[in-house]
Image (tube, grey):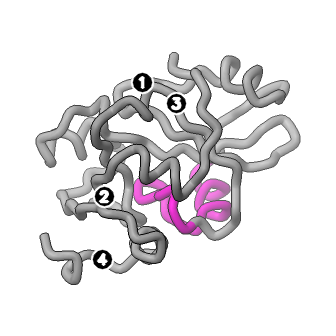
Amino acid sequence: MAKDKLPVTQAVRVLREHQVDFSGHLYKYEEKGGTRVSSRELGIDEHACIKTLIMEDDAHQPLIMLMHGDREVATGLLARQIGAKKVTPCDPKTADRHSGYQVGGTSPFGTRHPMPVYLQASIAELPRIWINGGKRGFLVGLAPSELIRVLKPVLVDAAG
C-alpha cells in the first residue's frame, strides 16, 4: 500500500515526523476481535501483533502498556515494577479520553495526553511488529527499535 493512500491519523503524522520506516495495513475490523482478528486478517503471527492498553495506577494516573497480542498483562507484576500498589485497565470511555483514540483503534503514537509507556521487554527482540495506527482496522508494521526510539518506553516483564 502506498504511503499516500494510508489513513492520515495522528499516529501516522508522528511516525512521519520522526521519519520512521513503516508499512500500513488495512483489515476488516471486528468488534471485540482484537489481535486475534487483526493477525488472522493480515496473515501475521499474533505474538508480533502488539496491543496498546490504556491503564491507570492506584493514583488514577494513566499509562500505556504494550503487550504481545497472544499474552495478557499480569497487572500485579506490572505494578511492582513501576512502583505502584496496583494497576488496572481503564474502562473504554476513560481510555478514549486519555488517548484521544477510540478503543479498538488506540495507537501509542500521538496520544492526546502524554503518558508513560511500558513495553513488554520480549517485544524488543522481535524482528518486526504490527501495532495500531490510530484507527480501527488499521495497523502499522515497523521495527521494534523504531518504536523504542520514538516512544522511549520503560521495558518491563509483565506478561501473564
Residue 95 colored magenta?
yes
CA–CA distance in space, label 2 to label 1: 20 Å
Q: Position of residue 144 (x, y in %)?
A: 40, 44
- State yes or no: discs 2 and 1 in contact (Cβ < 8 Å): no
Q: CA distance from mark 3 to mark 4?
A: 27 Å
The residue closer to the viewer here, 104 or 160, is 160
- CB of mark 3 within 8 Å of CB of mark 1? yes
Q: Which residue is mark 3?
A: 120
Task: Look at 58% across and 68% down and name the residue there.
Answer: 100
- Whether residue 89 sits left or right of residue 67 in the image: it is right
Choose top left, top right, bottom left or bottom right for residue 95. bottom right
Whole-number angstrom distance, CA of label 4 to CA of label 2: 11 Å
Residue drawn where x is 47% and y is 76% of the image:
17
What x and y, as percent, mark residue 63?
A: 68, 46
Query: Which of the two labelled residues, at mark 4 and mark 2, occupies the earlier sequence position?
Result: 4
Q: Earlier in the sequence, mark 3 or mark 4?
A: 4
Magenta stretch containing residue 87, yes or no?
no
Q: Mark 2, residues whose alpha carbon is within 10 Å: few (<14), some, or many (≥20)? A: many
For badge 4, the amino acid type reads Pro
Which residue in the structure is indicated by mark 2? Answer: 140
- Measure the alpha-carbon separation of dots 3 and 2: 18 Å
